[in-house]
Image (cartoon, rainbow, N blue to C red):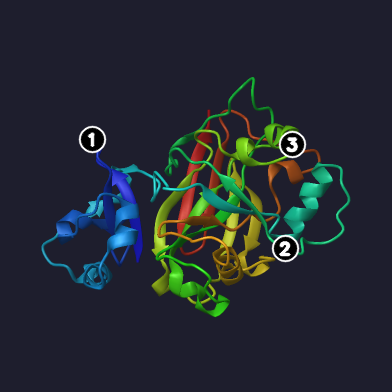
Amino acid sequence: MKLLTYKIPGEEKERLGVTYASAFQRFFALEDLGLFFEDMNDLIENITPEQYEILKNSNDAKDIKVMEYDKVIHCAPIPHPRQDIICLGLNFREHARESTRYKRETFDAAPAYPVYFSKRVNRASGDGDVIPSYPGLVDSLDYEAELGVIIGKEAFQIKKEEAYDYVFGYTVINDVSARNIQTRHKQWYFGKSMDGFTPMGPFIVTEDVMQRPPLFSIKSRVNQVLRQNGSTDQFIFDIAYVIADLSQGMTLKPGTIISMGTPSGVGMGMIPPRFLMPGDVVECGIEGIGFIKNTVV
């Protein structure tokens, strides 16, 4: 089951939908199913088991208008996260290697412990939105295709083997990064938190339709040329480990988003580095979820 947030052209109201079973391009509006939520955060936190069953069985709904994905405005599934996104740095061995090469450091080994940082998101961008290039401020704009894990219920001091019971679903994130800002400040917060630096979507795929652990391929393309080609089985620290680890000292609230790190193939990892320029089109996709396409301006 895939959930989305969208707008009808000419309206500002954000609406929720669930994909039609036979084709992801077709979906039902939740309000037409008799389900009313303020936004995706509200749904994740407050949906009842009975309402969830209505969503799961939406393909059997009769006399309900079928919506067309290409005829609506695509929003990020969670346009306004309630908290900063929790991100993992260097969670793929080869990306850790290319990162140290860019910084002219020696790669000794993969990190022994997860590298966590946060990413401020005033508004997450949707499929089709633009990525601002910030001329005069940013001279090394980069992309990072990542798997976003969305927490479904409050998790505190849980065991690793329980972790997937706390996952609501998965989405695609492009962790857009200003490398010169990131390097200059000796930390990653500002260089990854500028407005427009979090394209997300196009859907949330619910955890209950995936295997445990999920196996996803992660790809990115720039101007239709393949740049990244990785898989979630290459994580240094896997989803269950990360959720359990974080929960030992912090409460993970419903709607919390964890971005699991990026494979090798980013612009700074190329020899010489190749950063994004205005007019470039970036596609980030994850098998089983979909892809988001954004143009740099």
| 250 relative position to 115: left or right | left
Q: Which mark is first along the chain, 2 or 3?
A: 2
Mark 1 and 2 residues: CB-CB less than 8 Å, in contact?
no
Check disc 1 and give the amino acid type: Glu
Residue density around tag 1, few if under 14, some if 14–19, many if 20 or more, within 10 Å: few
> In the rendered image, which residue does mark 3 sit on?
183
Element under label 3?
Answer: helix
Q: In which quadrant is the N terminus drawn?
A: bottom left
Residue at 66% x, 41% y is 188
For disc 2, the neighbor class at 10 Å (few under 14, some 14 to 19, many from 20) is few
Q: Earlier in the sequence, mark 1 or mark 2?
A: 1
**Residue 170 vs residue 86: left or right?**
left
Secondary structure at badge 1 equals loop
Q: Position of residue 244 (x, y in %)?
A: 57, 70
Residue ranking furthest to the bottom: 161
Q: Which of the two marks, 1 or 2, is nearer to us in this view? A: 2
Q: Residue at x 50, y 77 (%)?
A: 162
Q: Nearer the viewer, mark 3 or mark 1?
A: 3
- Element assignment for label 2: loop
Residue 229: horizontal and vertical position, in percent?
65, 57
Q: Is residue 114 above or below residue 164?
A: above
Residue at image mark 1: 11
Residue located 33% across and 49% down the image: 5
